[in-house]
Amino acid sequence: MSEAIDNRQIRLARRPNGLPERDDWRLTTESLRAADDGEVRVQIDYISLDPAMRGWMSAGKSYIEPVAIDDVMRAGTAGTVIDSRHPDFAAGDHVTGNLGVQTHAVAAGDELRKVDTTLADLPVYLGALGMPGMTAYFGTLEVGQLAAGDTVLVSAASGAVGALVGQIAKRYDCRVVGIAGGAAKCRYIVDELGFDAAIDYKSEDIAEAVGDRCPNGIDMFFDNVGGEILDVALANLRLHARVVVCGAISQYNVTGHIGDTGYAPQNYLSLLINRARMEGFIVFDFADRYPEAAQHMAGWLTNGEIAHREDIVSGFDNFPDAFLKLFSGENFGKLVLAVDS
């Protein structure tokens, strides 16, 4: 008979208007049910906190159905198998899966991926060896069509995805310029990650700085921010440049219509003038190729060719405040919530 376990859950209580507030979620507790045939019970050790979660809270049309009111908040997770009724998993195995913001879960075996914690610590499988790593890999090499010698500009360059994009580009002998917030983050991307130059959007004029650091223009812009930074990049594109739209975190909490309280890009005609391409992508579109990316990323990490950094906040009850760090720029690296305090 399965051990009785109290499962604590963060559920969506209402849809946010602008920046989320604590009352947009509610905490519930229920008994974790036993696993049926083909299922496992998982203790969730780490929860991935990602900008995309803000979009999942909204009711507007998107690439995925919004989280329903009263449902457990959607999130990527990493944890430990408690007990198993699936032949491929045993108690003590470490796994990742989209199990939501809760302390425990019951999941079908095909919803989980077994991971090796002798290769990397468990939180890394929510970062460089997880969805951010897949996003950086396919966004840079497939969507961005990276070529040796390119000048690459990356926004949110010290974040989970941007830091990896820049390092991948350096492996292809590109000149890489990163935009980050604050002197410490700018030093990090240059001194530790190997970017060629940094722009501090908090203290520099973005238009002047991009012109200074990219005097011959931009071949590829990997955008995680949107807004004014996207507009400045558009104005500095080279012939046949590629703009990769991965995210637009500066706009996620805007209320009203784009161009009303949001920021509408003015320099989009640069795409025409420079015969450039601007393309959005969702990493799920490359799901059948994840093993390819994971193999490359794991090799680069093992060889010390790519560095990573996790910003871990402890305590399940700290979820709301930890999540909001994404929008204040407080997080430094991949933001992860450790379930145990």
Image (cartoon, rainbow, N blue to C red):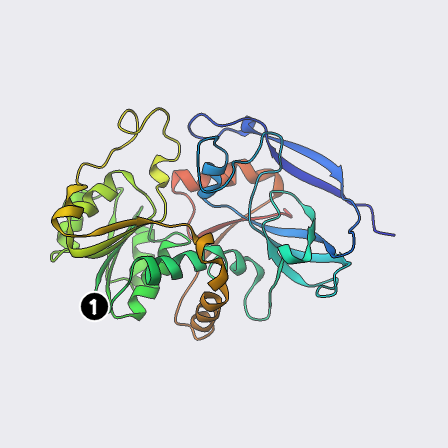
| Residue where numbered disc 1 is placed | 149
Q: The residue tagged with tag 1: helix, strand or loop?
A: loop
Q: Amino acid at mark 1?
A: Gly
Residue at horizontal 19 percent and vertical 46 percent from the top: 234
Left or right, 108 with reference to 221: right
The extreme bottom residue here reads 303
- Count neighbours of disc 1 (C-alpha within 10 A) and say few if under 14, some if 14 to 19, many if 20 or more: some
| Residue 129 placement (x, y as % from top left) | 49, 62
Q: Which image quarter: residue 192?
A: bottom left
Residue at horizontal 50 percent and vertical 46 percent from the top: 49
Judge whether 233 appears above or below 148 on screen.
Answer: above
224, 183: nearer the viewer: 224
279, 227: nearer the viewer: 279
| Residue 139 placement (x, y as % from top left) | 36, 57
Judge whether 7 appears above or below 214 on screen.
Answer: above
| Residue 302 placement (x, y as % from top left) | 47, 73
Residue at horizontal 22 percent and vertical 37 percent from the top: 265
Judge whether 134 appears above or below 68 on screen.
Answer: below
Q: Which image quarter: residue 235?
A: top left
Judge whether 322 appears above or below 215 on screen.
Answer: above
